[in-house]
Amino acid sequence: MNFVRVKAITKKEFLQIIRDYRSLGMAVMIPVLLLILFGFGLSLDVDHVKMSVWDQDKTYITRQLIRDFNDSKYFDITAHFENYKDIEKAIDDRSIMMALVIPKDFSKYISSSTDAPLQLIVDGSDSNTATIAMGYVQSVIAGYNAKKLKIELVKRGILNTGPPFDIRPRIWFNEDLKSKNYIIPGLIAVIMMVIAALLTSLTVAREWERGTMEQLISTPISSGELILGKLIPYFCIGMFDVFVAVLMGQFVFAVPLRGSVFLLFFLGSFFLIGALCMGMLISIVAKNQFIACQMAFLTTFMPSFILSGFSFTISNMSKPVQAITYLVPARYFVTILKGIYLKGVGISVLIFEVIFLVLFSSVMVILANKKFKKKVV
């Protein structure tokens, strides 16, 4: 390995990047734009559900029940209707997501200590949101029932009205249950994979298209020196993108970083090397910038976004798809980032993911080096 030749290739690639201001702008601005779009636009939190009420009883008891829903942060009662036709129209045009229908004799059922019927009409077109919202409804109803039961027991002279079990949940790692706290760390892995592979997927292909590869082949530079020289500039850009993403996560989105910053960048460098070499391998195979760009997108963005555990929980996938996720390198780095960010764990806990990350980087480096041949085909 002649580092003088590596330095020359690195300098040449840096000059090429500076001259191609569009690629440089893409490398810097796309991570920022993705973080802003996903950080502010993507949320799995379900709150402020728009709800309407049709109160056919109109008594103090029903007003108290409606007040319980209003006091909950999960519901916004935006309308009161008097018939099913208006409810159906409101659900159809999405002005509400659910409607609570209180029957005419509701207060009589409550006063006679018998089961009181309630009707809940829910827009189930978004099944996940509807399921979560119905869980919130059940929680409000359970609280209402508990208050009524306590009042009834006090009337009968039973003062010790506490429940037999006092459950006090303690949430670890994401106390506020905010989805951005695990979306942002996972997004860093997706951004690194996509940007790194897209940038390097154009390097060798560009040399072939411009006819400068023949000149490089005629020099005494080896395949390893050429690949290393081309990777160094993009490695610097990739690490800068990681730095920007970490800063934005900390100061823009207020995502807690409980673990070691050094460990984050250290393991991130392994992942970045693997992603860069993967893009380089695509570029060597394709020899065409358009084809290389398409291949890089299909082999990085789609698997990283869907199969890494970033947007969908892997345990909820079918068994064959779960097996495929083991071949997606972003899966391991997403787990590492969430562990460092939210749990503050170290290598001892993440050893399985670290081994696969190092293995991925090593395989990509070897394949890229073996695939590149110093000859005109």
Image (cartoon, rainbow, N blue to C red):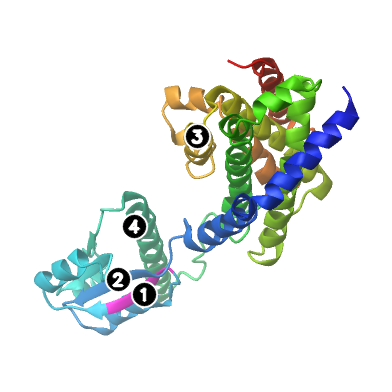
Start-end of magenta stretch? 74-78
When asked about the image quadrant of residue 69, the answer is: bottom left
Q: Nearer the viewer, residue 120 or 109?
A: 120
In-image side of 327 versus 115 (left or right): right
| Mark 2 / mark 1, whichever is N-terminal | 2
Q: Residue at x 59, y 36 (%)?
A: 202
| Mark 3 / mark 2, whichever is N-terminal | 2
Find disc 2 in the rendering and name its residue. Answer: 51
Mark 2 nearby-residue class (10 Å; few <14, some 14–19, many ≥20): many
User: In terms of secondary structure, where does tag 2 sit?
Assistant: strand
Percent coordinates x, y for residue 242 in the rendering: 71, 50
Q: Which mark is residue 76?
A: 1
Does any portion of residue 334 appear in the rendered image?
yes
User: In terms of secondary structure, where does tag 1 sit?
Assistant: strand
Q: Which mark is residue 303?
A: 3
Q: Amino acid at mark 3?
A: Pro
Where the N terminus falls, by quadrant?
A: top right
Q: Is residue 272 magenta?
A: no
